[in-house]
Amino acid sequence: MTRTATVKRKTSETDVSLELDLDGSAPPSISTGVGFFDHMLTHLGKHGAFSLLVQAKGDTHIDDHHTVEDVGLSFGVALKDALGDKKGVHRYGSCTLPMDETLVTVAVDLSGRPAFVWKVSFPTEKIGAFDCQLVEEFWKSVANAGLLNLHVVLHHGSNSHHIAEAVFKAAARALRAAVAIDARNADAVPSTKGVL
């Protein structure tokens, strides 16, 4: 079973090409034109333990919003497509992750129904030139396009960089657990309905 997807999304604002292999081992290859976002997506691929290639060009002369949002939509679609009928996956995953003074919990359900809960606040508006609000926009886009439940909770933290990085790493680890194949139920969809 090959769990891969390629998504191309081109609009008047962005041009995104994304490749995802849930069982791949290649290091992340990321280029979006948004330095801090590239850093976060590299963590997503590394800690999710999947191959992730992202090439994106956007109207960053306006701001980074469209680029971040459209990469999130593309990643969500790729995740959904790579999972197929979701037969054999664990479905649920969660991670509570420390990053220095910061502690974040992310929980995910590959339910086929989009739901997004965000309980995170940043002490600053920016991380360098990066708008902190875009972290929420990315993950909301992933949840909606990927048809999954995603809950993100900041327990405590005082450094915006650490908070954003903890969110991406915890989400990666939660997704890693959710998409993993359950050896005890490898031939079954993990739902009493029979479909997800």
Image: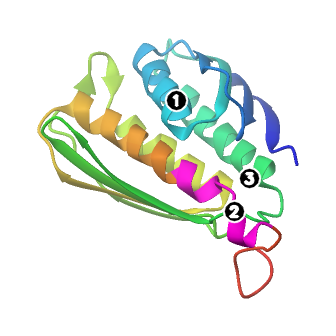
Q: What amino acid type should be assigned to the residue bearing mark 1?
A: Lys
Q: Earlier in the sequence, mark 3 or mark 1?
A: 1
Circle 1 sits on which residue?
A: 46
Q: Is residue 83 magenta?
A: no
Q: Earlier in the sequence, mark 1 or mark 2?
A: 1
Image quadrant assignment for residue 96: bottom left
**In the image, is residue 151 above or below residue 61?**
below
Image quadrant assignment for residue 178: bottom right
**In the image, is residue 129 above or below residue 18?**
above
User: Whole-Å distance between the Cαs marked 3 and 1?
Assistant: 19 Å
Q: Residue sitting at 67 percent across and 64 percent down?
A: 182
Q: Residue sitting at 70 percent across and 41 percent down?
A: 22
List x then y, in percent, for residue 39. Answer: 44, 20
Which numbered disc, 3 or 1, marks the residue closer to the eye? 1
User: Whole-Å distance between the Cαs marked 1 and 2?
Assistant: 20 Å
Label 1: state its secondary structure: helix
- Per the rendering, the mark at residue 89 is 2
Are circles 3 and 1 on residues that touch, CB within 8 Å?
A: no
- Per the rendering, the mark at residue 80 is 3
Q: What amino acid type should be assigned to the residue bearing mark 2?
A: Val
Extent of the magenta region = 175-186
Mark 3 surroundings: few (<14), some (14-19) or many (≥20) residues within 10 A: many
Image quadrant assignment for residue 194: bottom right
